[in-house]
Amino acid sequence: MSSKQATLDPTDLWGLALGAVLFEMNGYDAANNYEIEPTEENLEAIRRSLKRGWGIESTEDLMNNLRWLQEEGHRTSFYEMRSFLSTLSMADQSAFLETLPKNTEKHMQYILVKAYMHKLPLAGIAAWDFGRYVDLCRMGAFVGYISEETSWELIRKVAVVAQESYSGWLEYGISYVAGRQFWLGTISEEKAKQHTDYVRSLVLNKDSLWRRLDWNLKLVDEEEAEEAAEAEEVEAEAVETV
């Protein structure tokens, strides 16, 4: 990440903060807005991480993964499971869980969905997808798969969606932790506590981005928002007439 990040405006810092849990986990320096020193060793480490964790070895790979996180992500499976369970009574939910092979990923995920289905907002675990999206944008820019400018443009767009999806940083953080548990497909108090501790620190530490930035910070200029909405309408009409 370039040194330009040290002078980011509040709206870009807000977008960066969506990935704060992952950045904290990876030991990046919060005081320096999670910049990574651009050494050959660090570049190679990030390239290996992108390949191992995402199968990303090119710009195309990166954009495909970002598109998946934006349009589907793990929240889609969570939505489907939650929608199904919501049609059942509490007794029938428990009965259904008994039919699943114990300790399998699917069994664990349904248990997590049942535990969180009434505790999370409609957006569910989308925070997990948003956080990973921001991380991929920054890592992709770091190794040169996309430009710095493109990275921030993509983050700005997902930031607006994230802000509309949750009521505050704490709710976002809880949803993020739930999403990570769902992704892991396992119930572990130790892992849950580890990530809850990161969220707690971000919520309570007066120097963290979450404390420094108001969740309701104005991210988009009203005129820009109107122009974007009009452009989308024009594009949609053009598609319909094709």
Image (tube, rainbow, N blue to C red):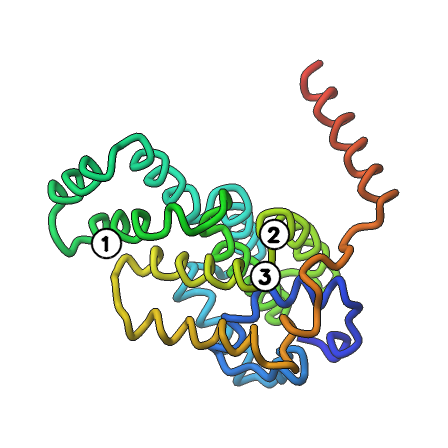
Instruction: Please tell me the numbered disc located at residue 65.
Output: none
Q: Secondary structure at mark 1?
A: helix
Q: Amino acid at mark 3?
A: Val
Q: Which mark, by number, is residue 108?
A: 1
Q: Earlier in the sequence, mark 1 or mark 3?
A: 1
The answer to the question of whether label 1 and label 2 lie on touching residues, with beta carbons closer than 8 A, is no
Percent from the top left, x then y, of residue 33?
A: 67, 78
Task: Using the image as rendered, state which of residue 206 and residue 136 is in the foreground.
Answer: 206
In the rendered view, tell whether residue 14 sits above or below residue 64.
Answer: below
Most distant residue in the top direction: 241
> CA gap, disc 1 to disc 2?
26 Å
Q: Secondary structure at mark 3?
A: helix
Mark 2 crowdedness (10 Å alpha carbons): few <14, some 14-19, many ≥20: many
Residue for point 56% across, 81% down:
28
* Quarter occupied by the N terminus: bottom right
Cα gap from disc 1 to disc 3, whole angstroms: 27 Å
Q: Please report the residue visible at 23 percent of the width from the left and 48 percent of the height from the top.
A: 106
Any mark on residue 162, and which? 2
On the image, the x and y values in percent for residue 23 come to 54, 74
Question: How packed is label 1: few (under 14 Cα within 10 Å), some, or many (20 or more)?
Answer: many
Quadrant in which the C terminus is drawn: top right
Q: Secondary structure at mark 2?
A: helix
The residue that label 3 is drawn on is: 134
Quarter residue 43 falls in: bottom right
Q: CA distance from mark 2 to mark 3?
A: 11 Å
The residue nearer to you, when weighing 79 against 166, is 166
Q: Earlier in the sequence, mark 1 or mark 2?
A: 1
